[in-house]
Amino acid sequence: FYRAFYAIRELTNSKGFPTNAIYGFTNMLLKILREKNPDYISVIFDTAAPTMRHKAYEEYKAHRPKMPDELRVQIPYIKEIVNAFKIPILEKEGYEADDIIGTIAKDAEKHDIDVYVVTADKDMYQILSPKVKAYDTMKDKITEEKDVIERFGVKPGQIPEIMALMGDASDNIPGVRGIGEKTAVGLLKEFGTLDNLIQNYSKIKKPELKSLISENIDNIKLSLMLSKLDTNVPLEIPVAELKPKDPDWSALLKFFREFEFGSLLKLIPAETIPQSAYVTIFKKENLDEFLNSIRQEVVLDTEATSKYPTLAELVGVSFSVTPEKAYYIPLTHSYTGVPEQLPKEFVIKKIKSVLENPGIKKIGHNIKYDLLVLKNEGINLKGITFDTMIASYLLNPNKPNHSLDDAALNYLSFKKLSFDEVLGKGKKDFREVSVEDATRYSGEDSAVTLRLKNILEPEIKKQGLEELFYNVEMPLIEVLADIEMAGIKIDLSLMESFSKELERELISLEQRIYFLAGQEFNINSPKQLREILFEKLGLRTIKKTKTGFSTDVDVLQELSLEHELPGEILAHRTLSKLKGTYVDALPKMINPKTGRLHTSFNQAVTATGRLSSSEPNLQNIPIKGEWGRRLRQAFITEKGHLLLSSDYSQIELRILAHLSEDEGLIDVFRKDGDIHTRTAFELFGVSPENVTSDMRRRAKTVNFGIIYGMSPYGLSQELNITPEHAKKYIDTYFQKHISVKRYIENLIKEAEEKGYVSTILCRRRLIPELKSPNKNTRQLGERFAMNTPIQGSAADIIKLSMINIRRRIKKENFKTKMLLQVHDELVFEVPEEEKERAQALIREEMEGAVKLLVPLKVDIGIGRNWAETH
C-alpha cells in the first residue's frame, strides 16, 4: 500500500477522504485474483509491537520517516476490503510480516505447493527456491532463484550474509563500513559461507579488509540476525486454510460506493437490483393499452440517429411507469429481417397527446436531448418535472460524470448495457440495432431512470435543494433547448477569407521562426523545440516535466524577455489554434438543414454551477486582441434582424459587496461609480482624478484577484511585479475593506466545519480539499471556498434571468430569440422593429433577477454582428 499511495497521488472521494492507497491496493489484489487465480492466498501485515530485531538493535529501521497521515487513515479500510474479499489476514505481535511470509512459504514448499510472494522487496529474495518465486504486480515481473544467482552471484539463502557484510541503509542495518556489495560477494565466494569467513578471517589477503572484518565481528553477527528472516513463526492457521472464498459483494459494494470507485463498482454482480421486464410494442391495440395506463407521470427515453439532437431523427422511444416494467416502440429500425414496425406518423400522432399534456409529469435522464429530438418530429414536450442527470449533478457537482451508466452504478450498483455495447462494431447509427437489443437497452434506460428518480428526489429535499432544482435548473432545460434549436448564423465567406489570411501569416511566421532558430524544425514538436531552445540556443531551463524541460506558455512568456524566438512560437501557437479550432472548424459544423451553427449547453459539468458549451464550444471564442474582434465579426444575423448583447457589469464584485456587506463597495455601486478607479486611489494613495489607466488596470487585477483567492505570487505574475510588491497591494486592499477580509475568513472557517459552501440560491459545492494534509491542496480548497459562492451566485442569477426573459418573450409574443449564453453575457437575435422593446425587456429582467444590497447593472450593445455589439 505504500507503493500504491505514492504511485497514485491526490485521489480522494467527494468528502475529501484520501483513497489513493485503498484504490491502488484493491486493484493490485484484483489483478492477482483475476490473472493468477490462486489456490491459496493471504495478506500479511506488520503490527505496531516491537520485534526481536528492534529489541536487539534500537536503531533498526529507526530513521524511516513516519507514515504520512493520509496513508495511515486508509490502512483500516484496506484491511476491511481484504476481509470483504474473504482473504485471510495474518499478523503476529513480535514478528515482522516478512517473517510470517517466509514461514508460510517454507511450509507450503514442504507440501509441494508453488508459492508466489507478492513483493518488490529484495529482502524477500532470500527465501526464493525452485518452488518459491517473487511477483511484482506493478512491473508484472516474476523473480526466480536463478535470477538471484545471476544478479548476486550467490544462492538466495546467502542474501542475508551479503547484507551482514555490506549493511542495508533502508533498514538501518550497520554491516561493515567500507564494504560494498562487490567486496561482500567476493568474500563469500572465496570463503563459501559467512561462518567460515568469520572463523578464517586471518586468511584474507588484503590487510585493510582483514582489519575491517576482525574489528566488526559483533556488527556482522548482529547484521546477520537483523537481515535473516525467521521462518519458524508459530502460526495458528495452516496453509490449507488459506483457500479463497466468494467475496462479500454487499460489503465491497458499500466500500466502493463510499470511496466512489466507479470502475470497481462495475465488478459488482448485477443481482443487487431487481430486473425489469422490457416489452416491445408492435401492435396498435398494445400501444393504446399502454398509453391509456399513463396517469400521473412517465419516464421517457428516445433513441435517434445522432448524438447531436438538432441533426437527430427518431428511431424509437421507450416509456416506464413503474420500475419493474418498460415499453419500447420501434419506429425506423432498418436492418435486414427487422419485424414490422408501427408507422412512424401513426405513433407520433398517438404519443403526441400524452407528451404535450402538461398534466402528466415527464421524467428523463438528460431530458433536454429527448425534448430536442421530439421537437424535430413536431412534438413539443410539456410537463418536464424531473431530470435525474441534473439531480445527480446538484447533489455532487464535483463528480466529473453524471451519465446514466455512471449514476446507475453509483446509486443502484447496476451495470447498464452501454450504448457502445448495443451499437457494436460496424453499425453507423441506432437504426441498425436489432429491435430486441434496442428494447432491452432503451427499456433499461427508462426503468433505471425511474429507480434513480425515486432515490434522488428525497435527497434533493433532504439537502435543501428543492427551490434551486425545481425553480431554476428544471425550467432552464427548456430555455437551453430553445437556444440550441435557434442556433446562430456565421458569415462563411468572411471565415474563408480569414482562413486564407491566417495561412499567409502562419507561413510568414514559420520563416521568421526558422531564421531565428537557424534551421527548419517541427514547430509543433515539444522535443524538437526543446532541442532548439535549450541545447542549440542555450536558453535557461525553467520547469521540468516527465518528458523533459517544459515549453509551456508560462515558460515561453518568461523566455521571450530574453530572446525573440519564444515570443514568435507563442504567436504561431495562438494563430494555429485560432485557425484550426475556430476559423476552419466552425464552418464544417454548420447544420445543413438550418444553415446555422448549433452548440450544446451543459448544465451538469462545472462545479460552480456555470453552464458550459460544447460541440462547438462558443464560450471560448477569443475576446481580446484584433483577431478576437474580427472572429466575432463573423457571427451575424438573418436579414431584417440585429444582434443584441446584454452583459452584467462587474456582477461578481457586486455579489462580493452583497455577501461581505462592505460599506465601501456598497457605496461605490449604489452611486454607480467606477469600482476599479476607487480601488486604484485606495491602493496608490492618489485622488480619483489622478488615477492613470495603468493604475486602474492594476486595481482591476487586484479586485478580481481577491475574488479568485489569488496569492501574492499569482498576482505578481499577472502584474509582472515582485511577490513582495503584490503582497503589499493585497494587504492594503484588506486594510481598506476589513469587511471583505472578515467575510473571507468566516467563509473558509465555515467551509472547513460544514465541508461545503453555498451560493445565494443555496447551490452547494463540497470542498474536500480543505481537509487535505497537503498545504497546496488545502490552499486550492481555500480558493474554491472563496470563489464558488461568488461565481456560483453569478451563474444562478443569469440562469434566473434567462428563465424570466424566455417567459416574457413567449407571453408577450416577441419574435426575439436568445442565441447564446457566454458567462455573464446573453446574445439575442432581434427583429429590427422589436429593438427598443426587446432592449427594455431584457434590461428589466436581468437587472431585476434578484434583490441585492447593491443594484445589478447591465451593459447592452446592438449591431449587425457580434463584434459591433461590444
Image: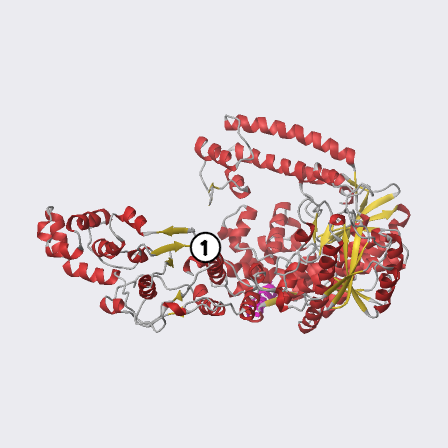
Viewer-proximal residue, 218 or 698?
218
Q: Which portion, as a residue range, is magenta?
A: 737-752
Viewer-proximal residue, 249 or 61?
249
> Is any part of residue 664 visible from this angle?
no
Viewer-proximal residue, 574 or 33?
33
Instruction: Inspect the magenta stretch and tell me whether residue 747 lies in it.
Output: yes
Q: Main secondary structure of the magenta part?
A: helix
- Residue at disc 1, secondary structure: helix
Identify the image quadrant of the N terminus: bottom left
Residue at 53% across / 67% down in the picture?
Answer: 252
**Residue occupied by mark 1:** 7
Q: Which quadrant of the structure image shows residue 802?
A: bottom right
Q: Position of residue 154 (x, y in %)?
A: 24, 50
Q: Position of residue 92 (x, y in %)?
A: 34, 71
Position above or below: 197 against 60 = above
Identify the image quadrant of the C terminus: top right
Residue at 50% across / 63% down in the picture?
Answer: 18
Amino acid identity at mark 1: Ala
Q: Position of residue 155 (x, y in %)?
A: 25, 52
Q: Position of residue 79 (x, y in %)?
A: 45, 68
> Is any part of residue 162 visible from this angle?
yes
**Side (left or right) of 411 relative to 544:** right
